[in-house]
Amino acid sequence: MKALFYRIALTCFAIALCGSANAHDPNAEKGIKRLGEFDIVNSGGFVERDDKRIEMQPDLDVAHGEFSLDLEDKALSIEMKSGAKIKLEKIEDGIAAFSWDPGSIRLLHRQDIMQIAGVSRPQDVETWATQLQWPDVGPATIVLFKYNEDFYGGFLVSRSKETTFVRQMEIHRWIGPRRRADNTRSDF
């Protein structure tokens, strides 16, 4: 009986400790919700010049960023491990506010994004965007959309008079090593 009492007390203490840690988060007091660390990869893209489209292969480099959400204006902020900071504004019309033509290139179409996000209307896909200077390319628009708490997608698009440059991104919450089946058994 005494052991049961101590287990219950310890559980209550752990719950109170977790709750108080979140309650005293300095970012929470500023109206900022920390979303966590995410890995960002370029999963495809294309360059179009003179009506000729050339598919870009996935980039195997992984970037790392800390994501947070401003609870007042719903802006999404990313602080990259490289030190770069990006603030994207909430787009109320979701992906309906943007147009892109993936054509025959292996990029996501509007329907793909809606299906992955589990919504039936493009306006219902949570979306953020901003303008930025893309090194070696120039002015660009970055658009991110939310599939779920652990998975976002996006496009980085630059259009000039002669060239359109598009990179598709996959953004996954960093959660450490994946669980794997035990393959050390000798009866395989």
Image (cartoon, grey):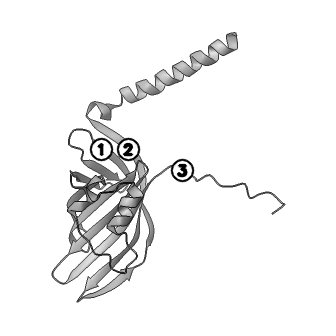
Real-space Cα separation, disc 2 to disc 3, in angstroms: 16 Å
In this figure, which residue is indicated by the disc labeled 3?
A: 176
**From this viewpoint, which residue is outermost toward the top?**
2
Q: Is residue 104 above or below residue 125?
A: below
Q: Is residue 64 visible?
A: no
Instruction: Report the residue at 40% width, 76% height from top.
Output: 106
Type of the residue with mark 3:
Gly
In the picture, the disc for residue 69 is 1
**From this viewpoint, which residue is outermost toward the right?**
187
Q: Earlier in the sequence, mark 2 or mark 1?
A: 2
| Label 2 SS | strand
Label 1 crowd (10 A; few <14 / some 14-19 / many >=20): some
Observer-side mark, 1 or 3, equals 1
In this figure, which residue is indicated by the disc labeled 2?
A: 35
Residues tagged 2 and 1 counted as in contact (Cβ below 8 A): yes
Label 3 crowd (10 A; few <14 / some 14-19 / many >=20): few
